[in-house]
């Protein structure tokens, strides 16, 4: 198969470039939204399908684990067969899986449909970033575009609980999946009309052994985190799980280091800025997902709030992310990523500290303040992390870099859900507030870790000065 270089394609007009960004952002909004929109409906889904908190974690993590596992191979497929083509396939799979979720008659089928959603979403996330990066040849314009892209993705994650609460109150929990259908149809039309086809400079071979080992490592890790409270952290099954995780992770690293065209280019992690951005992405999404799930379980179980009221309580978080994400993108374009990362770390840590002494009757204003602070931190975090990951890399490697950082985000989401669910699993409603305290300390620690990422991003990451 003949591949074409992006450099050989005609340059797009400014209006066309930003239209491409808008179309990709619309599709990415769905990916982020479906990561968190289900959170607020978990108690209602559990009541409807007769399952408990621990099992319900799989409704979220079946999506995030599969998404995280397949992002790398989807990026390689896009570079080989065409980014627009893979993007369109992802939209179709995501749409079909959403309909399957909406009509699922049992818990098992719902989890399976959520996993299929993850397959479709894996073809959207890294490919969207690669399309955006390749459409924007100017570094300053690219930085602004990445800021917008990250802002939309961050907003979708923060807006998920609000949207989910409103839909569930009006139409029931299945509506959080039905709502995807018209958006998918619109996105398919817009992609066909406005997004040009592009490929990598050369086709990369698929690394199937690496893909299998990566999937096993992630599934085992999240599975042990979810099931650990039930089986016991030192039980023989848990110990066997730890051993398998070590073996598969070591096998993955060995396979990747020996491959001429690996699934995950581990050499990228020798770049301190890239490694810092990946770890930062994990920390940000651990903090966000711990916050969202603990919020859902605490407000609905411990305080008896409805899904709508619970979703509405996260409005300050969505507001903070909405206002600060574009501001963060502008700061990254003008000053580099360090200052936005410092702000992200400070606000996230402050929000976690507000909740470390959470009680059954904590003042609602303190809750809202904490959610606002965490939302502001999340809004400031995404653009500098994404920009740092792809800065200094040629456009032909944008798909790989974007896939790794997207994988890190989803790994953080899965770990956050598993940790929060483990803290709340089996706890009576009256004890949920106290049981959540380690989770809020973890949120605080994730915020503080962003200061480390900010320090690592300091050298030579600011964009070049504008020519006179």
Image (cartoon, rainbow, N blue to C red):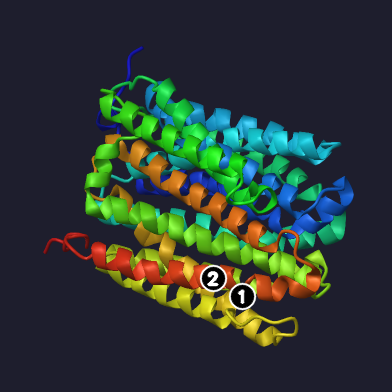
Q: Is residue 11 left or right of residue 280?
A: left
Please tell me the numbered disc located at residue 412: none
Q: Is residue 288 left or right of residue 12?
A: right
Q: Secondary structure at mark 1?
A: helix
Q: Position of residue 327 (x, y in %)?
A: 41, 70
Which of the 4 image quarters holds residue 302?
Answer: bottom right
- Label number found at residue 316: 1
Q: Earlier in the sequence, mark 1 or mark 2?
A: 1
Give the vertical position of 296 relative to 132 (above or below).
below
As rendered, which of 147 and 49 lies closer to the eye?
49
Question: Dividing the image into 4 quarters, which one contains the N terminus?
Answer: top left
Q: Which residue is mark 2?
A: 375
Residue that appears at 39% across and 59% down: 280
Q: Quadrant of residue 73?
A: top left
Circles 1 and 2, Cβ within 8 Å, touching? The answer is yes
User: Which percent across, then down, holds residue 111?
Assistant: 72, 38
Dot 2: element: helix
Asked which quadrant contains residue 200, the reply is top left
| Coordinates of residue 160 in the picture (x, y in percent) | 65, 58
Task: Classify 428 as above or below 150.
Answer: below
Q: Is residue 464 left or right of residue 133?
A: left
Query: Is residue 117 something that shows in the picture?
Result: yes
- Crowd class of label 2 (few under 14; some 14 to 19; many from 20; radius 10 Å): many
Position of residue 203 measured from the top left corner of the image (x, y, whole percent): 33, 21
Residue 64 seen in the figure? no
């Amino acid at each position: 198969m003949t591949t074409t270089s992006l450099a050989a394609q005609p340059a797009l007009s400014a209006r066309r470039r930003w239209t491409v960004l808008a179309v990709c952002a619309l599709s990415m909004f769905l990916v982020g939204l479906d990561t968190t929109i289900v959170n607020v409906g978990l108690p209602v889904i559990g009541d409807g399908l007769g399952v408990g908190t621990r099992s319900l974690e799989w409704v979220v993590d079946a999506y995030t684990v599969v998404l995280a596992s397949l992002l790398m191979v989807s990026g390689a497929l896009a570079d080989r067969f065409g980014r627009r083509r893979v993007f369109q396939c992802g939209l179709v799979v995501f749409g079909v899986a959403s309909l399957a979720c909406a009509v699922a008659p049992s818990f098992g089928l719902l989890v399976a449909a959520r996993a299929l959603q993850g397959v479709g979403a894996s073809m959207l996330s890294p490919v969207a970033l690669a399309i955006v990066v390749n459409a924007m040849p100017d570094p300053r314009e690219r930085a602004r575009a990445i800021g917008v892209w990250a802002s939309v993705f961050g907003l979708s994650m923060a807006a998920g609980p609000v949207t989910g609460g409103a839909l569930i109150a009006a139409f029931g929990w299945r509506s959080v999946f039905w709502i995807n259908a018209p958006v998918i149809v619109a996105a398919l039309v817009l992609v066909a009309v406005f997004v040009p086809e592009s490929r990598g400079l050369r086709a990369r071979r698929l690394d199937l052994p690496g893909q299998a080992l990566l999937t096993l490592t992630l599934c085992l890790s999240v599975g042990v985190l979810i099931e650990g409270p039930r089986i016991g952290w030192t039980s023989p099954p848990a110990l066997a799980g730890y051993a398998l995780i070590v073996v598969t992770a070591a096998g993955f690293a060995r396979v990747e280091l020996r491959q001429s065209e690996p699934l995950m280019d581990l050499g990228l992690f020798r770049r301190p800025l890239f490694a810092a951005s990946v770890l930062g992405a994990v920390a940000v999404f651990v903090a966000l997902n711990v916050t969202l799930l603990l919020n859902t379980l605490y407000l609905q179980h411990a305080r008896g709030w409805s899904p709508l009221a619970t979703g509405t309580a996260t409005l300050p978080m969505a507001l903070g992310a909405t206002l600060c994400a574009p501001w963060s993108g502008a700061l990254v374009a003008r000053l580099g990523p360090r200052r936005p990362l410092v702000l992200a770390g400070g606000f996230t840590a402050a929000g976690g500290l507000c909740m470390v002494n959470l009680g059954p009757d904590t003042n609602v204003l303190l809750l809202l303040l904490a959610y606002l602070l965490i939302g502001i931190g999340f809004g400031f975090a995404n653009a500098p992390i994404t920009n740092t990951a792809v800065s200094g890399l040629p456009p032909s490697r944008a798909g790989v870099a974007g896939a790794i950082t997207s994988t890190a985000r989803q790994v953080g989401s899965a770990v956050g859900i598993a940790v929060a669910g483990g803290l709340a699993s089996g706890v009576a409603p009256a004890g949920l507030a106290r049981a959540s305290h380690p989770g809020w300390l973890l949120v605080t620690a994730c915020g503080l870790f962003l200061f480390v990422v900010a320090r690592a991003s300091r050298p030579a990451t600011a964009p070049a000065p504008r020519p006179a």
